[in-house]
Image (spheres, helix red, strand yellow):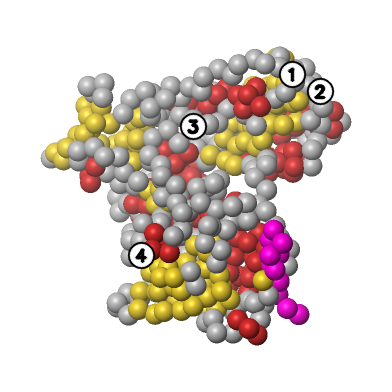
Amino acid sequence: MSRKMLIDGEVNQPNEQEAHYDFDLFVIGAGSGGVRASRFSANFGAKVGICELPFHPVSSEVIGGVGGTCVIRGCVPKKILVYGASFGGEIEDARNYGWEVNEKVDFNWKKLLQKKTDEIVRLNGIYKRLLSNSGVKFFEGEGKIVGPNDVEVTQLDGTKLSYSAKHILIATGSRAQRPAIPGQELGISSDEALSLEELPKRAVVLGGGYIAVEFASIWRGMGASVDLFFRKELPLRGFDDELRAVVARNLEGRGIDLHPQTNLTELVKTEDGIKVRTDHGEELIADVVLFATGRSPNTKRLNLAAVGVEVDKTGAIKVDEYSRTNVPSIWAVGDVTNRVNLTPVALMEGTCFAKTVFGGEPSKPDYRDIPCAVFCIPPLSVVGLTEEQAIEQAKGDILVFTSTFNPMKNTVSGRQEKTIMKLIVDAETDKVIGASMCGPDAAEIMQGIAIALKCGATKAQFDSTVGIHPSSAEEFVTMRSATRRIAAGTKPKTNL
């Protein structure tokens, strides 16, 4: 059976007449998006090659590893550390549940670090086997584009390999960036934070995004003192403001010192540690300073300008709705395009690419109702529109349903930490257009809620669903009375 691609009336049939190419597809970058795209393309019958930098937990221009950011220095090792940090609070709470924990419990950072490293090494091997079992040819080295249908792979020893391909896919992800302040070389990124040889006793985190609040929670849960600095009034800009306020209270309740509307201006090495100076004239000493100030698309060394691939001002590759660049033979998926920078989104984009180019099924990624989670302690998870987005986009009135309560577990443990749940409903259609939660198991609960939103569930259908008792999740189907109704045309408040 011939492979076909149909986009906007164009049919490509990569068979006998294109045999002069070394590969039907060559992928630069073997992270989540690149591995998914290459495997699925190979399953459709394409001859596929892929390259990735040699493995290392901390990335650089010349090291990386199959599995990419998520598997090696992102989601997976981060969640392992979150699990480890969560036990600190669990042990405290256990005392009121009858567990006689009479002495201070020691935490062995090096043991957890080794377990984390063992796991990412195992996953790196699994990803390599997934490629091999799919018939994808793997090359270890740095890839760059030297022509519309040509790539060059530079191996660690300097050897250069050249290959031609009918299609080239860029899936090189993104890299952590550092603020341009004096002494910035004394700080670390999330890469190094996941592989510190010693657990810091005094940590400073700069940033208000999910990486910042997650690492603040991790280090605090492991016993470190943590100061979190961010530019806005609340952390997690872009999330629902009401939920952001709850996250901030919970962070403070766990012992994290918040410094809103504050930036770092200088780091200075001293005998006692790293001296941190702020734009408010504050000074403090830290063992480690984490810069969680965003990530940049990893495009600088790809040689894109030489072949005319367009990028935006951040360096992100411009693509159409099918992930195709302005050069017809070159495509891009994942964080390198700076669309929705989440691992499952890169997987979706990689799948759609393979279907479009080699599966005879033109497919556009669907960015509606994408759920996500912030694994602070306790976590935040959302899907659909925030209240602020709903006010801005709605053509009619919206209804807001909220429930704030002390989880049943806390009534015995004595922990003073509220859970909040929220539903945003279109008043005219009764459709639930947004849901959010901050509290234990938020991500696990929200994955099911996301299916309901994707199916277009109404508030009446939520109400008619029998709850699981006793559980926090049942609150999503028992919120009967609207907390407030917001009239069409109301101006959304300024994002804090």
Image quadrant in which you'd find residue 278: top left
The residue depicted at 23 percent of the width and 46 percent of the height is: 185
Is label 2 in contact with label 1 (beta carbons under 8 Å)? yes
For disc 3, the marked residue is: 236
Secondary structure of residue under mark 4: loop
Give me the C-alpha separation between circle 2 and circle 1.
Answer: 7 Å
Q: Would residue 296 appear left or right of 319 to someone viewing this image?
A: left
Q: For the N terminus, which image quadrant?
A: bottom right
Q: Would residue 436 appear left or right of 152 to someone viewing this image?
A: right
Is label 2 in contact with label 4 (beta carbons under 8 Å)? no
Please report the bounds of the magenta region as a residue range: 1-11
Give me the C-alpha separation between circle 3 and circle 2.
Answer: 30 Å
For disc 4, the marked residue is: 63
**Residue 226 picture location, percent across and down:** 35, 33
Disc ID at residue 397: 1
The residue depicted at 51 percent of the width and 23 percent of the height is: 495
